[in-house]
Image (cartoon, grey):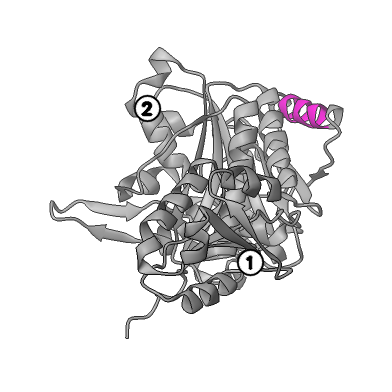
């Protein structure tokens, strides 16, 4: 017997509706902010993620699903959406024809992590990318856009944390100080962090094992005047929009390309309390072979947002079920069902290979509201029986006015 692979899942009815519900909310709000959808490939060259996400990240080192195709190319299932979006921006020459772009994407990502509540090996992300502007207003816009989406879906208890990771002017000294400090405590660090000291010491601060214990005593970043100005403007814009946030100097995003303002949305007390996050990545477009183009963005974990939400219960729509009492009425029953559907009325049925008792049993199992039954008596009178399964009441309705009568019940 074949079994589902650990970390993957089948999604049915209610859970699928929640996924779709969040997608619908996000699309509506993206439209308000004039972001345009991009659909990036599920598979890219592994090199894309190594060069962008960073070879010192857990994603690249341990979590990517990679394989060699028939041409000998090393491919990877996408672990995140930003590298593919930036590649598309460069490859389609947007920097020349329309440098300022506001993209959003919705799609499944793949990471070979240890499965936990809200963390699967195939998971869905919704992301936004703003390429072509270095204005602090864009950082603030992205944070507020993200807030609008998660709160509109029903996340009520959340915390926004923000920080600034500096730029190429103020980060070198910070990096040097971190290297000195981490080397002094190298024996206490995990094997991965010992490697990260020379490659990307900021990643030690984000380590699941060592991060919390080193953050308090590690050197702090002294921002240059330019970064201070930008960061203060971001905070001022958030305050002017009544957005509450916590300034957290220990916040480090887990991807190598981030610089400048970064942010994270947290909800709940579990280890997986980060439901979304992002920030500036001003060097990424250039580092991937494109123009020197500033950019910022974020991604939210759909499953985590759903876990953190308190969505309003969906209003149940009335469901009708067409039953044929005999084979000779099957065609007419099929036509009745299609006529109702054409009017936008939720209609089930069509199980005409079963007898009337079995059809009625199936309608009860599906929690149907009303059953429409066509048999000999009804057909002779050019009517159809309409039965309310909640009250048990039943009446005859003219086939000519059936749609009108049914709409009264919706």
Task: Provide residue 66's location: percent of width, then percent of height.
Answer: 31, 59
Residue 94 drawn above or below residue 105? above
Is 132 placed left or right of 249 in the picture? Answer: left
Comes first in the chain, label 1 or label 2? 2
Task: Provide residue 189's location: percent of width, then percent of height.
Answer: 59, 69
Task: Provide residue 258's location: percent of width, then percent of height.
Answer: 56, 40
**Residue furthest to the top:** 97
Give the residue at x 39% y 47%: 49
Give the residue at x 36% y 67%: 327
Element at badge 2? helix
In the rendered image, residue 230 lying in the magenta stretch gets the answer: yes
Residue 90: which numbered mark, if any? 2
Give the residue at x 61% y 72%: 188
Q: CA distance from mark 1 to mark 2?
A: 37 Å
Which is in the foreground here, disc 1 or disc 2? 2
- The quadrant of the picture occupied by the N terminus is bottom left
The residue singled out by tag 1 in the image is 210
Q: Foreground: 202 or 285? A: 285
In the rendered image, residue 225 lying in the magenta stretch gets the answer: no
Q: Which residues are magenta?
A: 228-238
Q: Foreground: 66 or 10? A: 10
**Residue furthest to the bottom:** 1
Is 396 placed left or right of 392 in the picture? Answer: left
């Amino acid at each position: 017997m074949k079994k589902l692979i650990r970390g993957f899942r089948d999604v049915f009815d209610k859970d699928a509706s929640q996924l779709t519900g969040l997608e619908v909310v996000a699309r509506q709000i993206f439209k308000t902010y004039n972001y345009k959808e991009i659909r990036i490939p599920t598979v890219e060259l592994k090199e894309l993620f190594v060069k962008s996400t960073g070879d010192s990240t857990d994603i690249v080192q341990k979590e990517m699903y990679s394989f060699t195709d028939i041409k000998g190319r090393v491919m990877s299932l996408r672990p995140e959406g930003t590298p593919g979006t930036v590649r598309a921006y460069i490859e389609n020459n947007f920097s020349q024809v329309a440098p300022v772009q506001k993209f959003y994407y919705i799609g499944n990502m793949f990471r070979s992590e240890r499965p936990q509540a809200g963390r699967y090996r195939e998971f869905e992300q919704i992301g936004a990318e703003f390429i072509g502007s270095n204005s602090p207003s864009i950082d603030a816009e992205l944070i507020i856009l993200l807030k609008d989406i998660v709160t509109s879906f029903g996340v009520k208890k959340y915390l926004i944390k923000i920080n600034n990771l500096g730029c190429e002017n103020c980060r070198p000294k910070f990096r040097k100080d971190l290297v000195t400090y981490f080397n002094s405590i190298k024996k206490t660090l995990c094997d991965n962090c010992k490697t990260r000291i020379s490659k990307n010491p900021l990643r030690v601060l984000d380590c699941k094992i060592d991060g919390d214990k080193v953050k308090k005593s590690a050197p702090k970043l002294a921002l240059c005047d330019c970064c201070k100005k930008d960061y203060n403007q971001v905070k001022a814009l958030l305050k002017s929009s009544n957005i509450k946030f916590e300034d957290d100097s220990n916040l480090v995003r887990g991807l190598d390309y981030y610089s400048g303002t970064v942010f994270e949305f947290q909800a709940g007390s579990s280890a997986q309390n980060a439901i979304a996050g992002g920030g500036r990545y001003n060097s990424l477009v250039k580092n991937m072979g494109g123009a020197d183009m500033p950019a910022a963005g974020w991604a939210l974990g759909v499953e985590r947002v759903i876990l953190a939400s308190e969505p309003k219960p969906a209003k149940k729509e009335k469901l009708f079920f067409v039953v044929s009492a005999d084979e000779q009425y099957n065609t007419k029953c099929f036509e009745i069902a299609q006529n109702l559907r054409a009017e936008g009325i939720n209609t089930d049925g069509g199980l005409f290979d079963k007898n009337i008792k079995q059809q009625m049993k199936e309608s009860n199992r599906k929690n149907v509201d009303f059953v429409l039954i066509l048999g000999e008596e009804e057909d002779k009178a050019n009517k159809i029986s309409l039965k309310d399964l909640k009250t048990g009441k039943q009446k005859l309705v003219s086939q000519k006015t059936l749609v009108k009568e049914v709409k009264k019940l919706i």
